[in-house]
Amino acid sequence: MVCSKQMKVPSLVKLNLSVTERCNFSCSYCYQKNLKKKDRLNPETVERVIQFFFPWLSEGGYIGFYGGEPLLEFSLIEQAVQFSQRLSKTQQKKILYTITTNGSLLTESLLEFFNRHRFHLTLSFDGSAQDQNRKEGSRDQLLTLIPIILKNFSGIDLTVNSVFSPETVHSFVDSLQMIRQLGVKNSIHAFSTAEPWSERDFRRLIRERRRMATLFTAPEENNPGEKKKRQLFICAAGLDRISLSAEGKLWGCYLFGDYFKERLDDEDYSRYCFGSLDEFISEWESIYPGIAKNYGLLRQDYYYTEKGFCMDCPNLYHCHVCPITSILAGSVLLKKVPLHICRLQKINNRPWRK
C-alpha cells in the first residue's frame, strides 16, 4: 500500500476481525443470537484487511479474532496469523494476537497453535452460572480445560470473562471464588444490560458486593473498591482500533456492527460505519476523519439519563458506560444511558469495606 502524503496514517493498537457470526452456543444475553443471516469472512478479505491495516498497527499492536464463536472458522484464524507473520518479518514489526472464545471447541492442537503464537486468550466462563447463562453441560468441560491451559500452555495469556444477569447475580461471588480456585490470575466480570434490573435484582447485587469484600483479601481486577486514578471515559472505538464485521463492513468496534447489521435505515448507521473494505481502501483519506470524529464524541461527559446530565454527576470520573451497550440495552440515542445501567455503575463503583 502506498500511503498519501496528505494525511498521516493513524496509529491503531488493535485490528479486530469478526470471522463469523455463527455460534454453537445461544447465551441468554447475546446480542447476535437473533440475527437472521449469519455471515462469515472469506479468505481473500482476511488477507486484504491485514495487508491494508498492517502499517496502521503500532509496534506490539493486536490482531483480535471474534465471533459468534471464532473457532468455527479456525482455518481463517490460522491463515490470518500466517499472513501477518510474513508481513511482520518483511516490515520488522511485532504483532500480538488475541481471541475471545467459549472454549467448547478447544483441542490440544489448537491450544498448541495459540501457545506457539503466544495468544492472549479470553475464555467466556460464567462459573456457577455457566450452564444457566451459556450452554447446559459446558461448565464441567471448562472446569477441566482451564487447569490444563494453565499447567501445560505457558505461552497462552489466559483471561476468564464472566457475565452475570439478573437471573444469575446471586451466584456472582461463588463464581468468582470458583474461578480463583482454578488458579486463574486474570479475571474480569460484567453485568448483562440486555434486560432491565428490578429493585430486587439490585439488592441481590449489593449483597454480593458486600460478600466479596468479606471473602476476598485482595480486590478483584475490576473491583471499584480498588483505588484507581480518576479518568474521564472516552470510547476508543474508531480512534485507536478498527473492526471488520463478518459481512465485510468496517466499524470502530465490533459491537457497532452487531447492532447496525439489520438496521441499515438507522440515521446513525452512516455516522459510525466506515463502509466496506473496498470503499475504505480506495477513499480512506476522506472517509476516516469524519467517521472517527463521530466516535470521538462518545465520551462520558456527553452522556445523559432521564434524570440529568452525566457531567453533573459526582460519579463521572469513575463511570465507564460503553455507548453501544446503552443502545443495545434499549436507549434510542447513543448518548442516552438507560437508568438501570446508571444504577449498575453506581453500585459497582461504590467502595466496599469489610
Image (cartoon, rainbow, N blue to C red):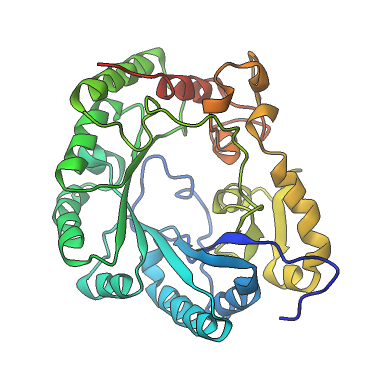
Q: Is residue 155 left or right of residue 195?
A: left
The answer to whether residue 181 shows anywhere in this view is yes
Residue 210 placement (x, y as % from top left): 27, 18
Is residue 265 shown to the viewer in this render?
A: no
Residue positioned 34% across, 69% down in the render: 118
What residue is rendered at 75% in x and 81% in y? 2
Q: From the viewer's perspective, is residue 185 above or below residue 148?
A: above
Q: Residue furthest right?
A: 6
186 and 328: which one is in front? 186
In the displayed structure, would residue 211 be above or below residue 20? above
Image side of residue 62 versus residue 189, left or right: right
Q: Quadrant of residue 310?
A: top right
Give how far across and how far down residue 146 sits, in percent: 19, 55
Residue 288 falls left or right of residue 139: right
Q: Nearer the viewer, residue 349 or 39?
A: 349
Whole-percent x and y of residue 132? 26, 39
Q: Quadrant of the N terminus?
A: bottom right
Q: Position of residue 159 (x, y in %)?
A: 32, 51
Establish if 158 lies above or below 302.
Answer: below
Quarter of the picture containing the C terminus is top left
Q: Residue at x 30, y 45 (%)?
A: 134
Residue 131 sits in quarter? top left
Q: Nearer the viewer, residue 245 or 311?
A: 311
Residue 14, by quadrant, is bottom right
Q: Is residue 48 above or below residue 292?
A: below
Q: How many numbered badges does the structure rendering display?
A: 0
